[in-house]
Image (cartoon, rainbow, N blue to C red):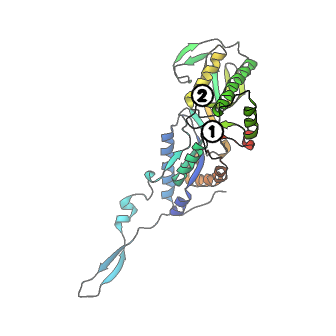
Amino acid sequence: MLKVVRYAPEAWNMLEGVFCVYKPADMTMNHLRKVMTGNLTRDLNLLKTRPATPIVAIEGSVTEKLVVKLKENYADHPLVLGPRYQPKDIKLTWAHQLDKNISGVCILGVNSGTKGTRKVRESQLIRSYIVSGQFGRTTDTLFIDGKVIGKSTYKHITRGRLMRTLMTIQAGHQRSSLNFLGLDPQSQEAYEALSAEGLVRPGEKSPPLIYALKIVDFNLPDFTLEVSCINENAVYLQHLVHDLALRLKTTAVCTQMRCIRYGPWTLQHSLLHKHWCLEHIIDNITHSKPLFKDIVPKSASLVMLKDEQCKEF
């Protein structure tokens, strides 16, 4: 149940922390910030704001009794200064840069919550995507909105061949994760490290690493994958679809990318565009606090996930 706040300064004090929204496709992060700060200032100015600070005036003459009065201060009046809250007053940052073509879970921090987004980013949480593609053609941008530069046959592809190729790619990334630890994949030390600690999370500047690849839908020429990875971006996901097709001796283009999980945050925690308002954001900040406390901090360039978190992958 949403908490009703009618006094703007009280609402402003509650507007501190990390929250989760659902970013639509075809929206840049800068445009999202502009919309979000505009909605917050609009709602804050609709609430009861503080009155204008009165001015102290001393009236009278030196020969008579001086009188101290409080007068209305027009220099602090909203009709002179404008609305109490301006978009530039609100600090808003994000934990991960989502490309214009990617929709889905987006973690934002407002005011003092900007430090929280830095902690989320440095914790190197695993993100999961639903990536859709289409076999048979390729574009200059590797995305469906690009110019078609090649076509090929795809009827030789089966679900089994696609699954085996995905397993090969996943195995290659698992070997890479052990290389981050400096261990031989065939050694006992590598086995004990993964058994005891779980999945390896490399540093922020490390190359992208895939933890899981799964087929969600397969209906030629269209297919949909679930990708759990780290340090990725839109270009990498598009190249993943392209390289997958090359392994299958065909071509493919990425048609859709959607983030469905960012660490403990899922689609169920995300605010839709119609809920990007003050009351829902304050409520989401409250519900995100226990999720934020459970984040495993990154203390080195290599981090291990706890066993409980590894079960999801």
Label drawn at residue 237: 2
What is the quadrant of the C terminus in the image?
top right
Q: Quadrant of residue 123?
A: top right
User: In the rendering, at what x and y percent does residue 71 appear?
Assistant: 36, 74
The single residue placed furthest to the bottom in the displayed view is 64
Q: Is residue 313 visible?
A: no
Residue to which mark 1 is pinned:
302
What is the quadrant of the N terminus in the image?
bottom right
Please tell me how crowded label 2 is: few (under 14), some (14-19), or many (20+) other residues with Cα within 10 Å.
some
User: In the rendering, at what x and y percent does residue 249 appear?
Assistant: 65, 13
Label drawn at residue 42: none
User: In the rendering, at what x and y percent does residue 49 appear?
Assistant: 48, 63
Q: Quadrant of residue 181?
A: top right
294 over 46 or under it: above or below: above
201 over 91 or under it: above or below: above
Please tell me how crowded label 1 is: few (under 14), some (14-19), or many (20+) other residues with Cα within 10 Å.
some
The residue that appears at 60% across and 31% down in the rendered structure is 208
Q: Mark 2 or 1 closer to N-term?
A: 2
Q: Amino acid at mark 1?
A: Leu
